[in-house]
Image (cartoon, grey):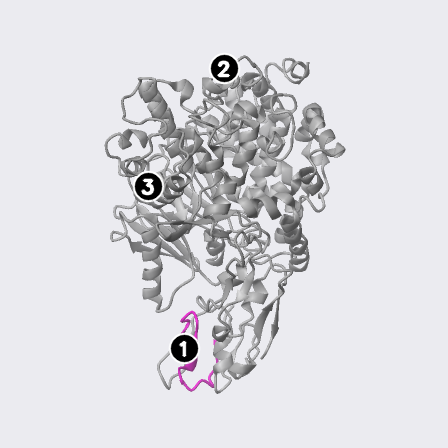
């Protein structure tokens, strides 16, 4: 599974510059290519693409979205068990297991420690084994 | 070879590091159904490829790294992987199960397992990138300790990719490079410690293996799996052991309980209590030194500790390390243990075997057998001893061969605390005789986990009479089989702690808890029946044992508690069947004389392990001969008749090489109960 760049690509290189796993290559003003072996389906390329030239793994065109509208994860604090699957899969490392709130804290959970780095990819919600993550935009 | 089952990636790679040839290892759906994964799958692969002539340090020996079907499915504590090989330490097959995140990433790379054969001429780092194997030169990393080596791997991957690459890692330290017989494989902070897997990796000249990829595990019934996970995570978090004791105190929390029960090995298993235990127990560790609880990926339990050594946050010690490097060598300095634990991880050595070998050496000197300059309680220069072992210098060169080898050279076999060459963990079996049996019969040598961990009932969490042998062999068989399969499915054994309903743990004096504890020794015959006919248990146990149901939802195979139990039995007997090839018989299922002949409490004959008596019942319950050889009938019943070695076994039995019928049937259960 991987995102695909269509012929509408104008080679602006924005996607390649921002791809969190360096899966996109191509020269400026030429059509870019996604390496399906590296792509993690975060969809950031599609949200940034000025020409909406990117289709997701299901073949749907990814809609362009300004950064303020990207949906960020909200963690259900009572449900989260701190298994760190979300943090491990987060492509930008903006999710982390929180520091202990007091000495001997055994209930450390996930938190969005660097919200500005979040790219709204929804991967954390997909991998959470207990659906403790929901989303909202600013 | 793809698979119809969920939970698997459907691909196992065979890598020949001599020729750098990579092929797909044939692994069929039928084998997936029979052997599930993990150590069971590895045992099948080793059994198919090793002969009685194979040597641990040879190109023919395989290093098999496998995952279980639950790894990557979101099941709790399921990011584990297993390393199996022919052990240089025990000379039989060994398996070491490890947490961390490598198992998770190996599946992301699209593989269920790796089978590595041959020997590279130059140091090698294997990178598994989405199912492809990249051979990298590791000459510049050779000699590095495990911490710097892992850092170097991250840097090299980032340099190649332009950005940091998330990956799972396996590395060996100097100990593995120099073939210290008990060297370990390290993955982040976690350690596949037992059996000397690191030495085999080092001999093959493989410094590191990394895995990365973007693939996802397909679950057969995702909705049901997620619903089960939600309940399961919640249950584990609410259970007094997995939701409170383990997160709060880690495994180290057991030190105080063991002290109370006389089960804390002290001065090389001379005593069961250590006067200064309060200075080196889990409570002190938690209050004074633990900075934060850490856990493996996907784990809600988080039993790992993080402590500071030289101002740097590093992994804290587990119970076995605390017990053996504390009371075991009469050391009451916890800070020294924290430092040694870190140093041993950096050098890539198993802390249990290292500590126990050291304790043997100290006692050998005390008894005048070996003048090595070591003494109980003298711990100033111990760090230097670790280095000497890892680099095989001076007395370290001999210590690196383990306690069995040393006892053969210098004498004192009665206090070289090992079984089949593998040193025992910190639990003193004379005050938990069921565990004593487990240590002795365990397929990989003196291991508490492979031995069934009966001590959990014999004082750690329940109060079953620790001195009675009654009912213990049958219970050991049952626990071994279930733990075998939990491990093979890819999960941590701590998830089985929750098998005992919370009231049994939190209310030790309630009538039902006392009734349960009283009942265990007398329900042997019932357990025997279940052990003989696991198919009778054709249901799933709700709430407390979710493993079988999870396996069903993840893979889509028909699965219930009985099938799960039987698969464990199959795996355990398969391992013994393979070990038979390497000459393992009843005489090898033994403990040092100190534990079987000398009572821990002078004058109290009950405080020693009545091993021979329990072994007779145990073999009978397992369907092995009294010489510990699985019979063709047992192999066939467990679905192992398709093995290439099955016919040979049948012929050997026909020739009369092994006793055909379990001798002493009449001397078995009936008399034990009398």
Q: In the rendered structure, does residue A9 fall within the stretch colored magenta?
A: yes
Q: Main secondary structure of the magenta part?
A: loop
In primary-sequence order, the first of circles 2 and 3 is: 3
Which residue is rendered at x = 66% and y = 53% of the image?
B234
Mark 3 surroundings within 10 Å by alpha-carbon count, few (fewer than 14), some (14 through 19), many (20 or more) = many
Report helix, strand or loop for mark 2. Answer: helix
Q: Residue furthest right?
A: B511
Report helix, strand or loop for mark 1. Answer: helix
Up/down of A37 relative to B462, above or below: below
Left or right: residue B191 versus residue B19 is right
Callout 2: chain: B
Callout 1: chain: A
Mark 2 surroundings within 10 Å by alpha-carbon count, few (fewer than 14), some (14 through 19), many (20 or more) = some
Report helix, strand or loop for mark 3. Answer: helix
Location of mark 3 (residue): B176
Location of mark 2 (residue): B597
Tags 2 and 3 touching, CB below 8 Å? no
Span of residues in magenta: A4-24
Q: Nearer the viewer, residue A85 or B220?
A: A85
Tell us which disc is closer to us: 2 or 1: 2
């Amino acid at each position: 599974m991987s995102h695909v760049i269509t012929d509408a690509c104008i080679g602006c290189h924005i996607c390649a510059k921002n791809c969190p796993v360096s899966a996109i290559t191509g020269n400026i003003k030429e059509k870019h290519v996604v390496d399906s072996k590296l792509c993690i389906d975060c969809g950031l390329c599609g949200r940034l693409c000025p020409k909406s030239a990117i289709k997701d793994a299901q073949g749907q065109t990814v809609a362009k979205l300004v950064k303020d509208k990207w949906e960020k994860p909200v963690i259900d604090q009572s449900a989260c068990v701190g298994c760190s699957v979300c943090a491990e899969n987060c492509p930008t490392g903006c999710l982390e297991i929180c520091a202990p709130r007091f000495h001997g804290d055994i209930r450390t959970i996930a938190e969005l420690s660097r919200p500005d780095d979040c790219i709204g990819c929804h991967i954390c919600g997909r991998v959470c084994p207990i659906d403790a993550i929901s989303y909202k935009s600013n | 070879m793809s698979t119809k089952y969920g939970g698997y990636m459907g691909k196992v790679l065979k890598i020949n590091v001599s020729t750098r040839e990579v092929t797909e290892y044939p692994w069929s759906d039928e084998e997936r159904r029979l052997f599930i994964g993990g150590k069971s799958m590895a045992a099948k692969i080793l059994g198919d490829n090793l002969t009685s002539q194979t040597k641990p340090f040879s190109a023919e020996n395989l290093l098999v790294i496998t995952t279980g079907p639950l790894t990557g499915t979101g099941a709790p504590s399921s990011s584990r992987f297993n390393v199996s090989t022919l052990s240089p330490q025990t000379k039989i097959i060994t398996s070491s199960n490890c947490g961390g995140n490598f198992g998770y990433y190996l599946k992301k790379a699209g593989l269920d397992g790796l089978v590595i054969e041959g020997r590279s001429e130059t140091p090698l780092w294997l990178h598994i990138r989405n199912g492809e194997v990249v051979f990298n030169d590791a000459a510049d990393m050779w000699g590095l300790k495990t911490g710097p080596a892992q850092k170097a791997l991250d840097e090299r991957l980032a340099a190649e990719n332009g950005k940091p690459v998330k990956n799972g890692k396996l590395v060996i330290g100097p100990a593995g490079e120099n073939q210290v017989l008990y060297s370990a494989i390290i993955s982040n902070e976690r350690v596949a410690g037992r059996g000397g897997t690191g030495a085999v990796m080092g001999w093959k000249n493989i410094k590191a293996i990394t895995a990365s990829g973007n693939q996802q595990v397909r679950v057969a019934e995702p909705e049901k799996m997620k619903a089960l996970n939600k309940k399961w995570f919640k249950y584990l978090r609410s259970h007094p052991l997995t939701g409170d004791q383990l997160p709060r105190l880690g495994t180290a929390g057991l030190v105080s309980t063991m002290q109370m029960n006389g089960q804390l090995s002290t001065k090389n298993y001379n005593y069961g209590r250590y006067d200064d235990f309060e200075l080196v127990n889990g409570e002190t560790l938690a209050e004074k030194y633990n900075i934060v609880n850490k856990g493996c990926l996907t784990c809600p339990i988080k039993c790992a500790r993080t402590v500071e050594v030289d101002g740097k946050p590093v992994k804290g010690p587990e119970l076995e390390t605390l017990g053996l490097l504390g009371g075991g060598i009469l050391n009451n300095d916890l800070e020294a243990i924290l430092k040694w634990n870190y140093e041993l991880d950096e050098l890539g050595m198993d802390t249990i075997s290292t500590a126990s070998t050291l304790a043997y050496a100290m006692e050998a000197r005390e008894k005048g057998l070996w003048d090595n300059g070591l003494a109980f309680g003298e711990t100033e220069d111990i760090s230097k001893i670790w280095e000497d072992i890892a680099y095989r210098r001076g007395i370290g060169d001999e210590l690196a061969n383990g306690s069995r080898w040393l006892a053969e050279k210098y004498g004192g076999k009665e206090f070289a605390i090992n079984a089949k060459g593998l040193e025992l963990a910190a639990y003193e079996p004379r005050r938990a005789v069921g565990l004593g049996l487990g240590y002795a019969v365990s397929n990989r040598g003196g291991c508490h986990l492979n031995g069934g961990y009966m001590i959990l009932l014999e004082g750690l969490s329940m109060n079953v009479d620790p001195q009675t042998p009654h009912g213990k062999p049958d219970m050991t068989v049952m626990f071994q089989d279930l733990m075998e399969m939990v491990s093979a499915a890819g999960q941590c054994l701590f998830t089985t702690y929750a098998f005992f309903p919370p009231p049994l743990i939190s209310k030790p004096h309630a009538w039902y808890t006392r009734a349960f504890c009283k009942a265990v020794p007398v329900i042997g015959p019932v357990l025997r029946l279940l052990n003989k006919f696991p198919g009778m248990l054709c249901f799933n146990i709700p709430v407390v044992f979710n493993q079988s149901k999870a396996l069903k939802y993840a893979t889509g195979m028909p699965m219930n508690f009985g099938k799960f139990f039987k698969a464990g039995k199959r795996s355990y007997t398969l391992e013994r069947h393979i070990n038979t090839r390497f000459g393992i018989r009843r005489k090898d299922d033994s403990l040092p004389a100190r534990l079987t002949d000398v009572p821990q409490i002078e004058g109290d004959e009950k405080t020693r392990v009545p091993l021979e008596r329990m072994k007779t019942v145990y073999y009978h319950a397992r369907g092995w001969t009294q010489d510990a050889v699985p019979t063709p009938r047992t192999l066939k019943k467990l679905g192992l008749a398709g093995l290439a070695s099955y016919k040979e076994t049948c012929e050997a039995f026909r020739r009369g090489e092994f006793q055909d019928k379990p001798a002493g049937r009449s001397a078995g259960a009936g008399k034990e109960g009398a």
